[in-house]
Image: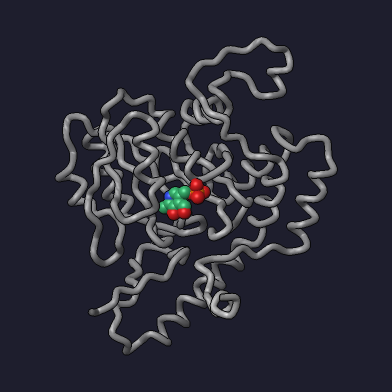
Amino acid sequence: MRDNMAKTIPYGKQTITDEDVKAVADVLRSEYLTTGPKVGEFEAALCKYTGAKHAVAVNSGTSALDIAVAALELPAGSEIITTPFTFVASANCALYNNCKPVFADIDSRTYNIDPDAIKKKITKKTRAIVYVDYAGQPCEIDELREIAGKHSLALIEDAAHSLGAEYKGKRVGTFADMTCFSFHPVKHITTGEGGAVTTQSDELASKLRMLRSHGIDKTPQERATYLYDMKMLGRNYRITDFQCALGISQLKKIADNLKQRENVAQLYGKLLAGMPVTLPYVSPEVRHAWHLYVVLLDK
Ligand SMILES: Cc1ncc(COP(=O)(O)O)c(C=O)c1O
């Protein structure tokens, strides 16, 4: 059993440096383990990297998706169009919020949601689209924005696979109304478990901050006065300061991480050339973040 395990190539694995360990240990010895200064510092670093106005860090990518849908305050029974070719969280975020996930098929080249398939699924009850940058390749964002604009739909980008990816020369993080990231250890950077929502909207950012912490309209520091209201049905999705310290330290290394993934993808391409498989198609309009390298077997 152990021998077999040793030969298994992991699906994904974190890289933790001495610097990362020190960053976490420093916070463990500090005053705040949670709701302290590292959360805001991590959010500022994410804003700087993605170009987003706001980032709200939470305890997982699943939580990020959940509060992104919750922030839209949709009536029960609203339909949210998403892709069937993804992790379960991309559709479950609709169910958590009493909405119905409606699946639109994928493009056979990119494996991303097909804008034409979305058009066929729009009904009077459709309120939003959750699109996933599958494997790290951004979707046809201009087309999705056009559809959303025409039908007054909210756009949520599930960018769990695509931190650092680019569409038409711009990094993922500002294209949709809200963009959701995951920092699970298999992703480009990790906080152990963790996630974030980025947005350009002050109103959505304020709702996301409330939803992350019980729907309460005051920050934990302000709450020390014990005068606060619960404005929305929030959750406790707060991320700790030591996780954020890890995130800050990890984010400093993302350029190397992306380059290394590009090199590995190129190597796979060379080694698999001539085999009975279809290699991944990469649109000329994107920089792929290579979370996954997916081949289609000919038979
Ligand atoms: C496309 C996609 N969305 C959302 C998630 C959920 O992220 P997390 O595991 O951080 O909750 C994942 C996790 O792998 C994912 O692949």
User: Residue drawn at (69%, 62%), measured in percent from left and top?
Assistant: 16
Determine whether, in the image, residue 142 is placed left or right of residue 266. Answer: left
Is 51 above or below relative to 271?
A: above
Residue lying farthest bottom?
274
Q: How is colour applied across the structure in the image?
A: one colour
Q: Say whether residue 159 is visible.
A: no
Q: Is residue 81 visible?
A: yes
Q: Residue at x 65, y 62 (%)?
A: 253
Residue 240 x %, y %:
68, 40
Position of the C terminus by quadrant: bottom left
Using the rendered view, name the quadrant where residue 242 is placed.
top right
Q: Is residue 99 left or right of 245 when viewed as pictured?
A: left
Near-viewer residue (110 or 167): 110
Residue located at (80% from left, 55% from top): 22
In this view, which residue lies farthest toward the left? 120
Q: Quadrant of residue 177?
A: top left
Count of numbered circles on the image: 0
Q: Position of residue 99 (x, y in %)?
A: 31, 31
Please state, as top left, top right, bottom left or bottom right, where the N terminus lies in the image. Answer: bottom right
53 sits left or right of 108 in the view: right
Q: Of 39 and 170, which appears nearest the observer?
A: 39
Looking at this view, name the residue that lies furthest to the top: 227
Where residue 211 appears, as percent x and y from the top left, is 52, 27
Task: Report x, y in % for residue 217.
Answer: 58, 18
> Please, is residue 79 above or below residue 147 in the view?
above
Task: Report the residue at 53% width, 75% height from top.
Answer: 8
Residue at the right extreme?
29
